[in-house]
Image (cartoon, rainbow, N blue to C red):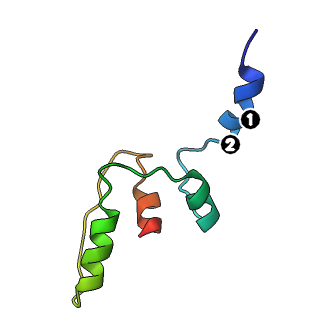
Amino acid sequence: MSNTSFWKPAYQLFKPEEPLTTPEELRNFYVQRANSPVENLITFLDMEDDPAKFLLAGHRGGGKTTELRRL
C-alpha cells in the first residue's frame, strides 16, 4: 500500500520557491533556525541611528526572504 494519498496534499501545497508572505503563514510554517541572525539584526537596528547595510546570502530556497519578512 502506498502513502501517496496521505502525502499528496502536503506535496502539492509545498512551494519552496515562494516565500512565506503573510503573518499567518509566518506563524504557521516558520521554523526557527539555529544560526538565524534576525534577533541580532533587530537589536542592532534598534540601537543604530545611522542607516546600516547588511548582506544576507544563501542558497536558493534557503529562507532569506522569509527571514527579511520576519525582520
- Report the residue marked by disc 2: 13
Q: Residue 54 appears in which quarter of the rendering?
A: bottom left
Kind of residue at disc 2: Leu
Specify the label residue 59 is tagged with: none
Locate the N terminus by quadrant. Answer: top right
Q: Give how far across and how far down residue 32 sits, in percent.
A: 43, 52
Q: Is residue 67 above or below residue 49?
A: above
Q: Which element carries disc 2, helix, strand or loop?
A: helix
- Report the residue marked by disc 1: 9
Q: Residue 27 appears in which quarter of the rendering?
A: bottom right
Q: CA distance from mark 2 to mark 1?
A: 6 Å
**Alpha-carbon neighbours of circle 1 within 10 Å: few (<14), some, or many (≥20)?**
few
Which residue lies at the image location 30% right of the left edge and 83% below the top edge?
46
Q: Give how far across and how far down residue 70 sits, in percent.
A: 45, 66
> Given contact means CB atoms under 8 Å apart, are the residues at marks 2 and 1 in contact?
yes
Which residue lies at the image location 74% right of the left edge and 35% below the top edge?
9
Q: Is residue 51 left or right of residue 63?
A: left
In terms of depth relative to the viewer, which is nearer, 38 or 57? 38
* Residue 22 appears in view: no
Kind of residue at disc 1: Pro
* Residue 23 appears in view: yes
Q: Residue 56 appears in which quarter of the rendering?
A: bottom left
Q: Residue furthest top?
A: 1
**Alpha-carbon neighbours of circle 2 within 10 Å: few (<14), some, or many (≥20)?**
few
In terms of depth relative to the viewer, which is nearer, 37 or 13? 37
Q: Residue furthest bottom?
A: 49
Which residue lies at the image location 57% right of the left edge and 51% below the top edge?
29
